[in-house]
Structures are given as C-alpha cells and as structure tokens.
Amino acid sequence: MKKALSDKRKIIFFDGICHLCDSFIQAVLLRDKSHNFLYAPLQGTTAKSILNHEFILKLNSLIYYEEGLIYSQSTAVIKILAQLGGPYSIFLIFLLIPRFLRDSAYSFVARNRYTWFGTKDLCRIPSSNEKKYILP
C-alpha cells in the first residue's frame, strides 16, 4: 500500500476489460445511492498510485480499498455488498465461512471469467453523473 493510513476513501478496483467485473461495478453503481464508493480499473493510474505492484498484477481479484485497508477476493465482495446497506447487509453472514473456502470458490470463477463472460475492448462510457465517481 502506498497511501497513508489516514486516507478515508472507499475505492473499488476492478479488471477494466472483464465483463463480469464491469457488470458487478454497474450493479454497485446503481445501488450505491449514498455514493459511498469511487471506482478505478486495476490497469489505471489510481491503482498504480495507491496499490502495491503485486495487487495490480493480480487482475483476477477485485480489490476494495477502505480507509487505508485493502481487501481482496471474496472478502472484498462481501464488504462492498454490506456497505450498500439494507438487504445487502445479509452478505456479512458469509464472513462466517472460512476464507480459504470462500476464496477457493472466488478463484474458480475468477480463473474462468473471461471464458464464461468474455472481455471487452472498449469501456462503457459512464453517464455524466457516474463520471465523478470513476477514477483514472
């Protein structure tokens, strides 16, 4: 991690060419009524300025950066969904499942996501409202 621990931002780092990752980001954007999150591709400059190189190389993991802490894989997804509040808070129950089991399932999907969901050459153009939450 390169930024100071006092950083209060909540940033979701994702694989910018993955359809599954993009669909997840679109779903969170739609439900994030309080605008808790900022979003940045792992291939972007924000990732390079905040994350260690090892995280950037791991395009098979969603990374959630919250107040100076880094969460990856299943824990990142669970924490993001829980932050949406309301019925999504129920996802916190999955933290009771041992991480090695959760991350094994996550890794299986991550390894196959390009085959199952494909990749994209171009990013979707965000709406003018969404642009203020998307980092380079």
Image (spheres, rainbow, N blue to C red):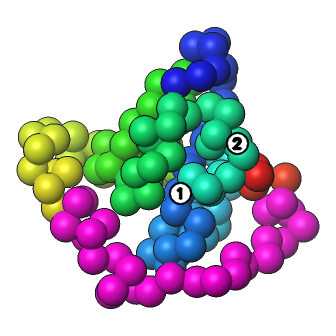
Q: Secondary structure at mark 2?
A: helix
> Residue 117: x and y, percent?
40, 85
Query: Residue at coordinates 37% horizontally, 43% vertically from top-left?
Result: 72
Nearest to the observer: residue 108 or residue 32: 108
The answer to which image quadrant residue 118 occupies is bottom left
Q: Which residue is mark 2?
A: 46
Query: Residue at coordinates 29% horizontally, 50% vertically from top-left?
Result: 74
Q: Secondary structure at mark 1?
A: strand
Query: Residue at coordinates 68% horizontally, 33% vertically from top-left?
Result: 49
Query: Which comes before the other along the chain, label 1 or label 2?
Result: 1
Few, some or many residues within 10 Å of mark 1 (<14, 14–19, 20+): many
Position above or below: 66 against 102: above
> Residue 62: x and y, percent?
43, 53
Tag 2: amino acid? Thr
Tag 1: amino acid? Phe
Q: Is residue 4 left or right of residue 89?
A: right
Whether the magenta-drawn stretch holds residue 107 is answered as yes
Few, some or many residues within 10 Å of mark 2 (<14, 14–19, 20+): some
Label at residue 14: 1
Q: Is residue 55 visible?
A: yes
Position above or below: 17 against 64: below
Nearest to the observer: residue 126 or residue 1: 1
Magenta residues?
A: 106-131
Nearest to the observer: residue 54 or residue 128: 54
Q: Is residue 82 visible?
A: no
Whether the magenta-drawn stretch holds residue 63 is answered as no
> Residue 64: x and y, percent?
48, 42
